[in-house]
Image (spheres, rainbow, N blue to C red):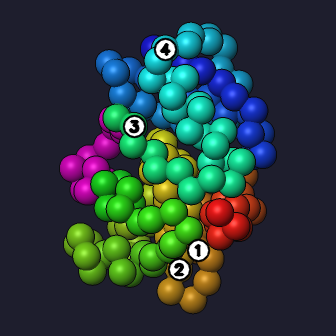
Amino acid sequence: MPQLSMHSPLGALTISEDEGAIVALDDGWGRDQEETPLLIRARDLLERYFDGEAVVFDLPLAPFGTAYRQRVWAAMRDVPHGQTTTYGELAARIGGSARSIGGALGANPIPILIPCHRVLGKSGMGGFSGFGGVEDKVALLTLERGA
């Protein structure tokens, strides 16, 4: 599986590709580095994003998960840069509960590209299982508000 790592304000990140689609974005530096056109494009978009641009991640994504999680992740891609929604609003739109939405977002293998950081709790920030936790969620939202 081709992987490409990059430096970011959140630390080292590794993008993974399988069969022509992005399947993961993990923290840390990957062992094997292979520059494919898709991984280079993803890295370039992420670099522009971290530079403060309002980037649309129009990349082929193939996260592994249940049909329900796929629906949640697809809905997340519809939340525009710099905007937020809540767990409850997502549940009302696509079905399930705020808790099931949170479970799906916690299992998101491609954070940032599938922007689970844009989902807030009804009365506050909510959780974030990506990278450094809620601190990184705040940093990503702050970055987007400045774009």
Residue 136 position within the rendered picture, expressed as x and y whole percent measured from the top left: 71, 58
Residue under numbered circle 4? 36
Establish if 140 lies above or below 62.
below
Q: Amino acid at mark 4?
A: Thr
Does dot 3 land on a helix, a strand or a loop?
A: loop
Distance between the alpha carbons at the discs numbered 3 and 2: 28 Å
Which residue in the structure is indicated by mark 2? 121
| Magenta residue span | 61-72
> Which numbered disc flags the more N-terminal residue, 1 or 4?
4
What residue is shown with label 3?
59
Q: Nearer the viewer, mark 1 or mark 4?
A: 4
Q: Please, which residue is most extreme toward the bottom here?
A: 123
Instruction: Give the camera-side residue of 121 and 113.
Output: 113
Q: Earlier in the sequence, mark 3 or mark 2?
A: 3
Q: Based on the picture, tell me whether residue 8 belongs to the magenta stretch.
A: no
Residue 40 appears in the picture as rendered? yes
Q: Residue at x 28, y 50 (%)?
A: 70
Query: Callout 2, which amino acid?
Result: Gly
Q: Residues within 10 Å of mark 1 (few under 14, many from 20)?
A: some
Residue 101: % across, % down? 38, 67
Residue that mark 1 sits on: 126
